Image (cartoon, rainbow, N blue to C red):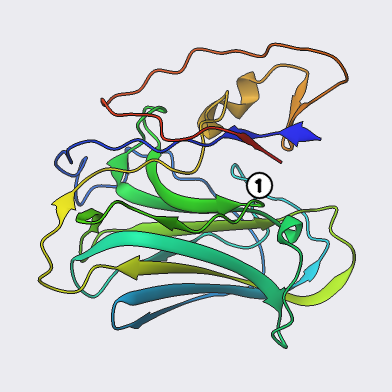
Amino acid sequence: MRIIMTCVLVTALAAPAFGAGNHDHHAVPTLQGQTTTAVTVQGNTVTLTFGPIDLPAAHDGDLAASMPKHIFELPKDMYLVGYKSAVFTKEGKPLPQNYLHHILMLNNDKESVSCPGEPLFFAGAGLEMTEARFPKGYGVKLEKGKKLMSVVAFYHKAPPTKDVMATFTMEMAPEGAPIKEMDVYQVGVNIVCYSKFGERGKDQTDEGIEIKPGVHVLSAPIKFRMDGCVKFAYPHG
């Protein structure tokens, strides 16, 4: 068993977009791959569909992706109020949740709350594939024209499987609904930010840190640039 992330939820009053309209200062990862991502907007639902891809697949790039990063924009201002993920074959057969390594959703117009110079993680999923829903009346504002980005990776030890797909479905508040804006960081806090992977210890790999029998304490300082609260924390992997 390995740990790659500790997942947290941080809420706070939203600040102005960081460097809106200028993405050059962000260390946006360069990812390679051959498969595609499609984005569909239907009513109050935005769905990203990844694949199909044949597994096992390698992990490339700074964020260990199985396919190219996908940058997209929303057609109008929307408030994210919940999301869920799924993994399945092209024919629609559900697959075990441990086929999915991670889905990361980033806002390239806002700065990370813990990694200076990196974009903000605003939603995502790991192999736990937990459906998330924010408290009623609260949402994460995703503005029209802002550069949003998805990164997806499948577990590279998954058994050989043809035409694997995944979806990440974001539920948006109805237009005109009263929503209090918040910032959310609910993907994970790596011990080392992805732009600093070259500084990892010898015991760390792209899969995280190996957990060995017995009691071990692993710690590292994490500095957040915002006030908020930790909603939950657990190992990922």
Question: What amino acid is found at the position of numbered circle 1 in the picture?
Answer: Ala
Q: Is residue 236 left or right of residue 42?
A: right
In this view, which residue lies farthest toward the front? 136
Q: In the image, 172: left or right of 153?
A: left
The x, y position of residue 109, in whole percent, is 27, 48
- Disc 1 crowd, CA 10 A, few/some/many (<14, 14-19, 20+): many
SS at mark 1 in the image: loop
Q: Residue at x 74, y 37 (%)?
A: 207
- 164 on left or right of 103: right
Quarter-of-image position of residue 5: top right
Vertical position of residue 20 compared to residue 39: above or below: above
Q: How many marks?
A: 1
Q: Specify the quadrant that holds the C terminus.
A: top right
Front position in the image: 161 or 193: 161
Q: Residue at x 57, y 23 (%)?
A: 191
Is 43 placed above or below 210 here?
below
- Kindly indicate the quadrant of the structure image that contains residue 2: top right
Q: Which residue is mark 1?
A: 64
Q: Quadrant of residue 100?
A: bottom right
- Residue 135 position, x and y percent, is 29, 51
- Residue drawn at (63%, 24%) of the image: 198
**Is residue 87 positioned above or below 212 on the image?**
below
| Residue 209 percent location from the top left of the image | 74, 26
Quadrant in which the N terminus is drawn: top right
Locate residue 132, reporting x and y percent.
44, 55
Q: Residue at x 35, y 31 (%)?
A: 113
